[in-house]
Amino acid sequence: MRPDVIVVGGGLMGCSVAYRLAKNDVRVLVLEKSVPGAEASSAAAGILGPSVESFRDAFARQLGRRSRELHAELADELDDLFGVDVGFRRCGVIKLVFDEADQVEVEAQATALEVNGVRCEEWTREDLLQEEPSCNPEVIGALHVAEDAQVEPKKLLSAVALGAEREGAVFRTGSTVRHIVVDGDRARGVQVDGELLEADRVVVAAGSWTTLIPGIRLDADTIYPVRGQMLATQTRPPIFRRIMFGAGGYVVTRPDGRVLCGSTEERVGFARGITFGGMAEVIGRARRIAPALANATVQDHWSSFRPGTPDGLPLVGETHVDRLLLASGHYRNGILLAPLTAELIAEAVTDKPSSREAEALSPRRFEETD
C-alpha cells in the first residue's frame, strides 16, 4: 500500500514522528539504513533538563519545558497502552558552583529562571552535601531545579517504535536513501537502491546525515556532526539521586545504580571512535563532580554524533520543496525535543496553521533558494 508519508530515519526522532502520525490515521513508512536507534538515540544520556541546559535562550528553554511535559504525558500513555516503563523520572537537576565564574553564571541562571516562572533554589555547600553527600566537598554552592527530569532513551525508543507499529506504521530496515526525488518543486518520494518509493510527503529525520542526502537544499554545514564520547559505570548504592552538572560535564544516575558520565563535544566530521583524550576529559569532569567515582569500574564507553546547527536550534517543518519536511538538527536536545518535534510535524502534515514555534524552527531560514 502506498504510504501517505515516508520518514527517513529510524531513531527516536523518526519513530516519534511515525507514532504521532500513525495515531492520526496517516499511513507511514519508516526507512532506516541499519536498525532503529543505532546512532545518537541509543547513545544519549536521556537528560530532560531545559532549565539548566537552555537558560541563556528563553525561546529554547520554553520549547524544552513544553516538550518535557509532553514526555511526562507520553510516558503515562506508553505505560497504559503497552505496559512499558520508559524510565521517566522527575529527579531534578543540580548545577554545581566550584568558583567565582560558576557563581556568576548560576546567579544569572537563577534570575532568568525565576523571571520566567521556573522554581529553583540556590543551595549552600552544606545544603548540597546534606542532599547529595557523594558530591565533591570542594563545591561552594549549587542551583537546584526540581522540575527537570530524565528518561531512558533505549526504553523510550523501543516503546515508541512499538507504538508506531501497533498504530500501523511500517518499518523497513537496511534501506539507504540515495536521494529525495523531486518533480518540479514538489517531493515525489525517495530513491532507495534503485527503487523509487513514492508518498504524498517525505519527512527527513536523519540526524547528522541529513544534509548528505541529495535533494535537500541545504549547505552541508547547516547540520553538522559533533562527536560525543561517554562512559558508564555502576555504584551501590546509587551515587546521586539527581542529575549533576558541573566542571563542564554531567553525571546521570539511574535508580538501579547505573551511572552515565559525559560528554565531549568534538567537531571531527564523521570520525568515529573513543580516544584517550576524550575519555580523560570525561573521567576528569566526572571525578570532579564525584570524587568517589575514581574507584568505579568502567563498564562501557561509546561515541556518537549529535546534529549541530549554526544557530543552535533544530530544523523542523516544511522546506521550500513542497511536501518535503525536516526533523533534524537537535544537537544535545534530541531526546528532550522529540515529542514536540513530532507534534509540529503532525501539524504540518495535516495542514494546520503554523504556530510561533513552527515559524521559528522552519528549515527555510537556512535553505538555498537559487
Image (cartoon, grey):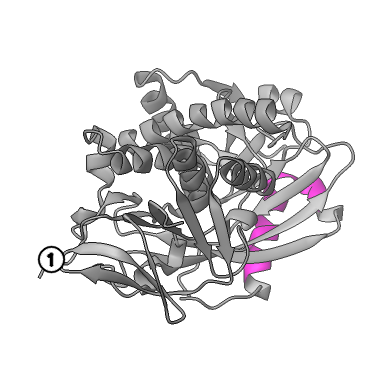
Give the residue drawn at x 36%, y 43%: 345
Give the quarter of the figure containing the C terminus: bottom left
Is residue 250 visible in this depiction of the protein?
Answer: yes
Region in magenta: 278-293
| Percent coordinates x, y for residue 330 in the rendering | 42, 52
Quadrant of res 115: top left
From the viewer's perspective, is residue 355 above or below residue 231?
above
Type of the residue with mark 1: Thr
Q: Secondary structure at mark 1?
A: loop
Position of 318 compared to 258: left or right? left
Foreground residue among 47 and 186: 186
Query: At x 73% / y 64%, what residue is drawn?
Result: 301
Any magenta on residue 67? no
In which quadrant of the rendered view does residue 105 lie? top left
Residue positioned 41% across, 25% down in the render: 113
As drawn, the residue found furthest toward the front would be 1
Position above or below: 164 against 141 = below
Residue 107: x and y in percent read: 43, 29
In this rendered view, identify the residue nearer to me: 275 or 284. Answer: 275
Say few, some or many: other residues with alpha carbon within 10 Å of mark 1 (under 14 / 14 to 19 / 20 or more).
few
The residue tagged 1 is 369
